[in-house]
Amino acid sequence: MRRVSVVAVVAVIVGCSGSSTTNVGPGLDAGRDGSKSTDSGHASSDTGTKTGHDSGTGSGDTGTGGGDTGTKDTGGGTHDTGVGDTGTAADTGKDTGAPTCSYPEALCSGACVDTQNDPNHCGTCAMTCTGTQVCTNGGCANACAAGQMTCGSGANARCTNLNNDPNHCGVCGTACSAPEVCAGGHCVCTPSFPAESLCSGACVTLSTDPQHCGMCSNACTGTQVCSAGTCQTTCMAPTTSCGSGASAVCANTQTDPNNCGTCGTQCGAGGFCNGGNCGCIGNMAKCGTSCVDEQDDPNHCGDCGTACTGSEVCSGGHCIASCAAGTTQCGSSCANLASDPYNCGTCGTTCTSSRPNCFQGTCEGG
């Protein structure tokens, strides 16, 4: 009996000591807490987190001892401040692009100047006339060339032709307003086919425009059309009604470059309509259905079948590395802005069928 009692006492002592110090390290509570029968004692079932059945304080086990943090989140949330992306703060919105100059102006020191008559940039940006010299036709001289006269005085003196200068048309200081041009010393609409007239600041065709039929103040009513400058119920021969509603016009399909042969057939830049067929004006050549200038067209350089490659440009009908003097690089073309109907006055300005020619940087009729 005495021996049995000693064994029993030892068993009780061992059973009570349980897991008072048995925490197996971070994240792994062995579960031998011994405080309640609801603790399964399986390490994988007890995460060391306090539950309703395990008080977490029995026998001195706090659930966080031995380096077991239990709920530590290492997702990096404290390292993302959310302010590292500055977005577009570095873009000030400043436009540093150079201006686009129109013929006959050139870009000199960030400004567009007429090198044909500017004494500070005469012929080229770097040439300055001296003393009382004037700049005439791009060269410094003591007097303006024949057919020109001086407008302005001192540093503002310019040699100009009063017959065609839109800034000094007829007399010094008389400027034409768009879309007018200076012709014969008078501000008129750009020469075109059919002929146009200026009405309320717009150039219109009085012979076919139903809003300005025959004269600026005469508008046709209802379904009337404007034929030969008079309001009619139908178009008079030899014209045909093309279009509908307010856009309907009485067109001669034998000569109208916007309705050549049939309504809606346009001859395009550099083209004209004769006998109902489109042709090409001047030195333009027909490649496919388009009129092109083989002297500066990189896709038809010298002839319809030759195309420039890489960074080459087309100048004088040859594919070369850079544009020759007197021309302006427009894309891969070396254009004469004074006469190129695809770059008339400025790069990219294309003349229309009604004004297919480019003359002195302005689109006009054939």
Image: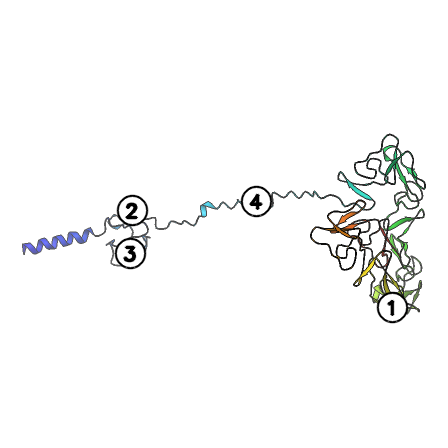
Q: Mark 2 belongs to which amino acid?
A: Gly
Label 2 crowd bin: few (<14), some (14–19), many (20+), radius 10 Å: some
Estimate the x, y position of residue 43 in percent, counting from the top left: 29, 56
Q: Nearer the viewer, mark 1 or mark 2?
A: 1
Task: Estimate the spatial distance between the alpha carbons at disc 1 and disc 2, rounded to whole Å.
Answer: 98 Å
Estimate the x, y position of residue 127 in percent, counting from the top left: 81, 35
Estimate the x, y position of residue 187 in percent, counting from the top left: 91, 48
Q: Which mark is residue 43?
A: 3
Relative to 128, residue 351 above or below? below
Q: Mark 1 belongs to which amino acid?
A: Ser
- Disc nearer the start of the sequence (2/3): 3
* Quadrant hosting residue 251: bottom right
* In this rendering, position of residue 146 left or right of residue 29: right
Residue designated by label 1:
241
Q: Mark 3 belongs to which amino acid?
A: Ala
Q: Secondary structure at mark 1?
A: strand
- Disc nearer the start of the sequence (1/3): 3
Q: Nearer the viewer, mark 1 or mark 3?
A: 1
Task: Estimate the spatial distance between the alpha carbons at disc 4 and disc 1, rounded to whole Å.
Answer: 61 Å
Please tell me which residue is depicted at 34% across the width and 50% down the height of the picture: 70
Task: Estimate the spatial distance between the alpha carbons at disc 2 and disc 4, rounded to whole Å.
Answer: 44 Å
Residue designated by label 2:
66
Q: Which mark is residue 86?
A: 4
